[in-house]
Amino acid sequence: MQSFQFQCPTEILFGRGAEEKVAEKLRERGASRIFIVYGGGSVIRSGLLARIECILTSAGLAFRVLGGVQPNPHLSLVREGIREALSFHADFILAIGGGSVIDSAKAIAHGTANPGTDVWDFWTGRAHLTKSMPIGSILTLAAAGSETSDSAVLTNEDTHKKVGLNSPFNRPALAFMNPELTFTVPHRQLVCGISDILMHTMERYFTSVKESNEFTDLVAEALLRNVIAQSKIAVADPTNYDAMSEIMWCGSVSHSNFTELGRGKDFSCHKLGHELSGAFDVTHGASLTSLWGAWADYVCPDDPARFAKFAERVWEIRSGSAEEKAHAGIQKTVDYFRSLGMPVCFSELGIGVLSDDAIAALADSCTAGGTKTIGSFHPIDRAAAIAIYQKAN
Ligand code: NZQ
Ligand code: ZN
């Protein structure tokens, strides 16, 4: 097992009615001026925002509200949020929504705590984040895992660049996770979220580390098997509390770094996928499934035994050589994504067939013009990125 350092400081309140403790928990942390961020209106339609406003008002907590966060959240709204949070003298940023809202809240927190720095500079690496302010979330969609993760992903709509920032300051202080709040998630978002949850563990399962790491492998395999099993129940009945609970909790564990301890991570599919979302505004989970099979076929020859282990333990494929099991496991995974109705190539993703020039531009963007590689299982250089995009095309 490789050495590791792990800290996930988020206080999690999980279960029915969890969000009703929001005022109590904010007070415990000394927060009194709450800047609330939400998305396109689902929290208004469900009545959740009004309920939270009522709870905060009753507790004597001041708040200001900013809505309008879109999926693949935009930098411009974050900048507006920073201006508003500063003028309101906010001392806590509360996201009510899914990953896009939580990531915007994280960015607003960083920008508010560092008013002299352009917030995008933290994402491009021009500035280093050394302080922020506390954030929390009332989660309404099991998917991105941002409620516990050390990551936040923003899109600069002027340059069409979608970029992730990893920092301990991205770890939220509080997460309120009531599975009932996810019952209204549309089918398409549900299956994109399930796919993203699986990918967060798969991107940590396939790394170049060869040392034994049995516990982390078992945790990862259990998570994958469980999400696959529960997804069948949840897709048939999105109001099934038990299935939605399992998926919601697995979503947080999957991206909390817990399934990478001692093994590290790869995340090349995420980086390849972010280029697609930046250029074509496609849904995050769909960007991943559209190219995972192409990535897996491309990198599998590096370590077929690893893919064979995945096939045996996740898909119960017992016969054949390591190569045969590996390929059967990849096929099973692609078939599973297809069974959810997820795209498994670019034409199914709805971006048509890309030209060679368009693919070269995507590959240039994610490898900084061929000057860097992404991922660790098989470091993906510009040529490899082009080959994977071509295969998914
Ligand atoms: O905006 P509203 O009206 O709220 O509707 C949203 C949105 O249209 C809707 N929705 C959410 N909860 C709902 C609901 N509709 C009805 N009922 C509910 N209870 O779902 C749509 C998608 O929301 P979004 O927040 O975009 O989805 P998700 O949670 O999948 O987040 C995706 C974003 O997170 C990033 C992705 O790249 C993408 O930008 N990621 C963030 C990560 C992180 N911070 O750790 C890691 C991930 O790998 C990912 O990259
Ligand atoms: Zn993801």
Image: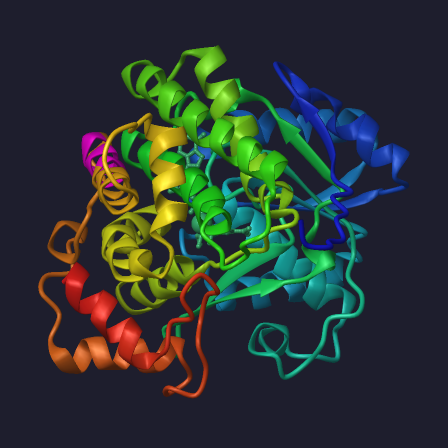
Q: Residue at x 58, y 75 (%)?
A: 120
**Which residue of the protein is positioned furthest toward the front in this rendering?**
321
Residue 294 lies left or right of residue 147; in this view the side is: left
Residue 321 position in % (x across, y down): 25, 41
Q: Is residue 201 left or right of residue 349?
A: right
The question of residue 365 being in magenta is answered with: no
Colour logic: rainbow
**Location of the C terminus (image quadrant):** bottom left
Q: In the image shown, does 13 or 367 lie closer to the viewer?
A: 367
Residue at image point 82% right, 26% down: 24
Relative to the observer, which residue lies in front, 265 or 256? 265
Answer with left or right where residue 191 lies relative to residue 111: left
Q: Is residue 334 magenta?
A: yes
Q: Residue at x 80, y 58 (%)?
A: 89
Instruction: Give the magenta part as a residue range.
Output: 332-339
- Where residue 134 appears, as percent x and y from the top left, is 78, 50
Q: Main secondary structure of the magenta part?
A: helix
x then y, percent, for residue 267: 46, 58
Query: Is 348 rendered above or below residue 391?
Result: above
Residue 45's image quarter? Answer: top left
Q: Is residue 161 above or below residue 277?
A: below
- Ligand 1, seen in the image, is in the quarter at top left
Q: Position of residue 66 (x, y in %)?
A: 58, 50
Residue 3, compared with residue 227, is above or below; it is below
